[in-house]
């Protein structure tokens, strides 16, 4: 175990070094070619890496389309020579200036911020004495991403859905999976390490640094940049107030529904979109300051690709850019931001629509659903809802006033409960209104983004998993953290005495931390939920030796057997319907993880019903017909599933068996 940890840490260092060659150096080359001048090493590293990641992923996708992926090696080749040439310029010259105390604070925030963010992901998929363990939802969500990474290592286009054989990947933002897959494929890093450990570290570093450099530049205040890192890494909701009252514990991160920014790494597409969005904001801010076309082009690149990292982020960015462009056209008679919007829209559309089918049908108009369910389900205030329904039934003017009072109070609980200590960001808004800074283009963009991100979940839900639309709100929390950072730095800076400054800073940090600490405590005080033990791993490794186009049939998930093997961690096939076979064997399954398939809008019900009927027919006749109809190559069965049918009577050859798994090859 100790040796595995040390080995992983050494590989992480190697991974970060490779990322400098593949992302940072080529990105800096783009900056040099565009004649973009940045102020210090931190800005150079951060923006170069973000631009390099965006360019690498976009070019990788284009090369996949034309079946010329070998040309992607130009990135590390040119990156190596660029790094040798510009190493001093990137890392040694123009150092950013901080006082000794500020530098210590900066380093402490980065170290603890990365550790707290990565700690929740890192243990999943790690080899614990021969078995893989999975915490939280990673046995399903993480396995989907790993399966997609393995699928993308094939030289096929369009991309196929590895959990639904014969169907093109659609209605999914896959750019983060593509870039992770390329890193694993090109440099032979384990997909499990890349997904659960290595990329989370890189994304966390970039998230903190990009927040720092943007807010520092926006507020023209280094301390505001430092506070931006604090709010991005650590600030949670006021959910801990509810849990303290209920059971004297701290926690309740999503008590008011919104997932907080410290836990964003659990959703890698969202984390990557955060970084690209902030990188766009920085370049956009520099464009507004200098009005140089080169900055406009770079902003168009970042703005255009964001949608394929995360659709929610791309929609918010495009909407805010349109609002800002219209504002500049009407009030400043300037049209270039509208051109930037059109350029970003064209890139976004070219990336999104070819991989989308009927995506508009995913949206359900259901206003106030999150607020109502927060009151009744999360907070347990059933009498509140009963009163609302009673007033609604009465139908008098005074009863409508009471409804307005209840709904208004619920709205304020939802707003300030989710914001937590970030609520001090309203100080920045008030100041902008008083000084009329609200009409600055960058402020128009930030406030438009915040309003769009906050409003959409209040009005719309997403089909499949209805609460997925709340992910829009994470951008609202991110941007409000920036507002809070500027407010905190100004208020603390206005205080006369040092002890007062320290006391206020201490109070802000204390109010920010509880839900994040509670999340960590909840994570590490509970056992992992699912496992893949050594015996099953050997079966999955056997599948890797089969033909690369093999189609694997697994038995349907039986939710009534969930947890029959005792306390967690339970075997992953008993825990949930998950695509772990596709992920860990690098082979396509006929159908698995039906929740994910449903989210993406596939019509799978008939196939799923036929599979269930085939496995429930003890004669084996329906299964034999099913295997033939869908051209299955291998039947993968856990021992608990293999007792229903006498497989020896079917046209199958048992090619693998151990204490956990039987694998049959279909004789064709």
Image: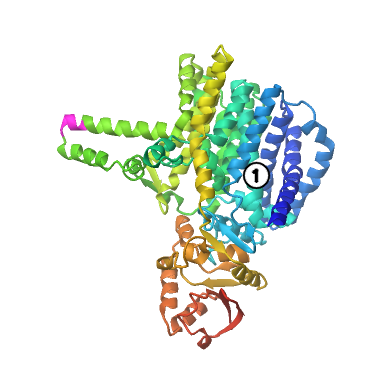
Please report the residue visible at 49 percent of the width from the left and 36 percent of the height from the top: 514
State the residue at coordinates (57%, 64%): 532
> Looking at the image, can residue 299 be seen?
no
Categorize mark 1 by other alpha carbons within 10 Å: few (<14), some (14-19), many (20+): many
Q: Quadrant of the N terminus?
A: bottom right
Secondary structure of the residue carrying tag 1 is: helix
Pointer 1 residue: 201
Left or right of 77 in this view: 321: left
Q: Position of residue 363 (x, y in %)?
A: 40, 47
In depth, the one of 130 and 189 nearer the eye is 130
Vertical relation: 667 (above or below) 389: below
Give the percent coordinates (x, y) of residue 382.
Answer: 27, 43
Region rendered in magenta: 396-400
Q: Quadrant of the C terminus?
A: bottom right
Residue 567 drawn at (x, y percent) = 47, 62
Q: Mainly helix, strand or loop, the magenta region?
A: helix
């Amino acid at each position: 175990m100790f040796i595995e940890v040390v080995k992983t840490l050494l590989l992480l260092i190697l991974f970060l070094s490779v990322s400098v060659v593949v992302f940072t150096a080529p990105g800096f080359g783009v900056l040099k070619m565009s004649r973009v001048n940045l102020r210090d090493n931190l800005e150079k590293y951060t923006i170069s890496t973000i631009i390099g990641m965006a360019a690498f992923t976009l070019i990788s996708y284009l090369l996949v389309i034309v079946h010329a992926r070998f040309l992607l090696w130009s990135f590390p080749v040119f990156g190596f020579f660029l790094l040798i040439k510009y190493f001093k310029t990137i890392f040694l010259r123009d150092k950013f200036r901080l006082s000794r105390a500020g530098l210590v604070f900066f380093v402490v925030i980065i170290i603890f911020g990365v550790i707290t963010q990565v700690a929740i992901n890192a243990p999943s998929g790690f080899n614990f004495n021969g078995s893989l363990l999975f915490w939280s939802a990673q046995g399903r969500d993480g396995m989907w991403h790993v399966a997609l990474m393995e699928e993308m290592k094939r030289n096929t286009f369009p991309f196929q859905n590895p959990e639904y054989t014969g169907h093109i990947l659609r209605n999914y933002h896959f750019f983060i999976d593509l870039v992770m897959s390329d890193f694993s494929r090109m440099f032979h890093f384990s997909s499990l390490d890349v997904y659960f450990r290595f990329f989370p570290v890189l994304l966390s570093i970039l998230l903190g640094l990009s927040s720092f450099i943007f807010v520092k530049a926006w507020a023209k205040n280094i301390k505001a940049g430092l506070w931006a890192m604090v709010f991005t890494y650590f600030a949670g909701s006021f959910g801990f107030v509810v849990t303290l009252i209920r059971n004297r514990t701290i926690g309740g991160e999503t008590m008011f529904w919104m997932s907080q920014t410290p836990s964003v790494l659990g959703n890698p597409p969202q984390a990557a979109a955060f970084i690209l969005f902030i990188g766009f904001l920085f370049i956009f801010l520099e464009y507004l300051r200098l009005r140089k076309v080169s900055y406009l082009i770079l902003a168009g690149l970042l703005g255009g690709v964001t949608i394929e990292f995360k659709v929610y982020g791309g929609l918010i960015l495009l909407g805010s850019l349109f609002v800002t462009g219209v504002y500049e056209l009407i009030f400043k008679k300037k049209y270039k931001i509208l051109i930037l919007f059109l350029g970003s829209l064209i890139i976004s559309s070219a990336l999104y629509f070819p991989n989308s089918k009927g995506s508009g049908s995913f949206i359900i108009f259901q206003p106030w659903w999150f607020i109502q369910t927060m009151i009744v389900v999360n907070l347990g205030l059933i009498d509140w809802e009963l009163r609302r329904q009673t007033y609604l039934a009465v139908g008098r003017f005074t009863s409508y006033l009471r409804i307005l009072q209840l709904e208004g109070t619920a709205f304020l609980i939802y707003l300030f409960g989710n914001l937590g200590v970030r609520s001090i960001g309203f100080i920045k808004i008030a100041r902008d209104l008083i000084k009329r800074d609200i009409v600055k283009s960058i402020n128009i963009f930030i406030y438009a983004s915040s309003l769009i991100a906050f409003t959409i979940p209040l009005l719309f839900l997403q089909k499949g998993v209805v609460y997925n639309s709340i992910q829009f709100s994470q951008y609202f929390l991110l941007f409000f953290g920036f507002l809070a950072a500027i407010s905190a730095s100004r208020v603390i800076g206005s205080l006369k005495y040092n002890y007062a400054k320290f006391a206020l800073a201490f109070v802000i940090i204390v109010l920010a931390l509880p839900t994040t600490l509670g999340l960590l405590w909840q994570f590490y005080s509970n056992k992992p939920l699912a496992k893949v033990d050594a015996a099953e791993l050997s079966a999955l490794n056997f599948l890797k030796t089969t033909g690369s186009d093999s189609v694997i049939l697994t038995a349907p998930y039986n939710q009534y057997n969930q947890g029959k093997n005792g306390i967690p961690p339970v075997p992953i096939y008993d825990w949930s319907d998950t695509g772990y076979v596709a992920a860990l064997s690098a082979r396509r399954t006929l159908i698995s993880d039906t929740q994910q398939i449903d989210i993406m809008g596939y019509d799978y019900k008939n196939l799923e019903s036929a599979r269930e009927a085939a496995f429930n027919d003890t004669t084996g006749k329906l299964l034999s017909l099913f295997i033939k109809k869908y051209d299955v190559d291998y039947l993968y069965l856990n021992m608990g599933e293999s007792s229903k049918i006498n497989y020896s009577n079917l046209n199958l050859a048992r090619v693998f068996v151990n204490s956990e798994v039987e694998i049959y090859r279909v004789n064709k």
